[in-house]
Every structure is written in structure tokens, then in C-alpha cells.
Amino acid sequence: MGHEYATEAVTATHHWMTMRKLSSRTACIIHPENVASARIAEKLGYRRFGEAQYRGASPIMFERSGY
């Protein structure tokens, strides 16, 4: 349990985006029952900014600005 693959993948993506001078803002949507993913997002600097409606669910929207 908890191999931290998601954390490593997102961290690598942030690094790749920084090296290529791509947008410094990233966003993700996470199902409200997926507590582990929400914790990872917050650990990596994402902050909740709203909710969406998708196929009968209300995923939480997170964003991260700047590096």
C-alpha cells in the first residue's frame, strides 16, 4: 500500500513542464470519494477551487499555480 507512484508521476510532470517553460497552472478533477488522490493533490500544492458535474457525480476541481 502507498507506493507513491502517483506522487512521483505528478512531480515528474511538473518538472517536465518547468524545463520546457510550459504553463505554470495545472488543474485536476477528483471524485469526492477518492480521498487518497485529494491528499496527494494537496500535498503537491493543489488547492480546491470548485466542483463540476460529470455523469451524475460532483468531482472536486483542484488547481496549482506557479512552481
Image: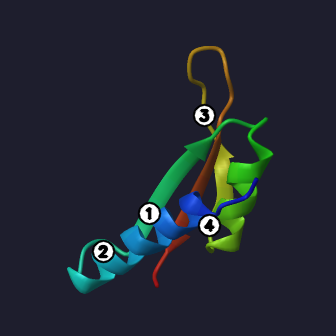
CA separation, marks 4 and 1?
A: 8 Å
Q: Indicate the secondary structure of the residue bearing disc 3.
A: loop
Q: Which residue is mark 3?
A: 52
Q: Is residue 14 left or right of residue 6?
A: left
Which of disc 2 and disc 3 is earlier in sequence? 2
- Toward the top, the furthest residue is 56
Q: Indicate the secondary structure of the residue bearing disc 4.
A: loop
| Closer to the eye: label 3 or 2 | 2
| Closer to the eye: label 2 or 4 | 2
Q: Is residue 27 left or right of residue 46?
A: left
Q: Is residue 28 left or right of residue 51?
A: left
Q: How far across and down, in percent of the image, does residue 35 sit?
A: 79, 47
The disc labelled 1 sits on which kind of residue?
Answer: Thr
Please say if 61 is above or below 39. above
Q: Which residue is mark 4?
A: 46
- Which residue is depicted at the point 65% across and 55% down? 49
Q: Which residue is mark 1?
A: 26
Are dots 1 and 2 in contact, CB under 8 Å?
yes
Q: How far across and down, in percent of the image, does residue 32 sit?
A: 75, 37
Q: Is residue 51 left or right of residue 29?
A: right
| Closer to the eye: label 4 or 3 | 4
Residue sitting nearer the eye, 41 or 64: 41
The disc labelled 3 sits on which kind of residue?
Answer: Ala
Which of disc 1 and disc 3 is earlier in sequence? 1
Q: Residues within 10 Å of mark 1 (few under 14, many from 20)?
A: few
Q: Which residue is mark 2?
A: 17
Are dots 4 and 1 in contact, CB under 8 Å?
yes
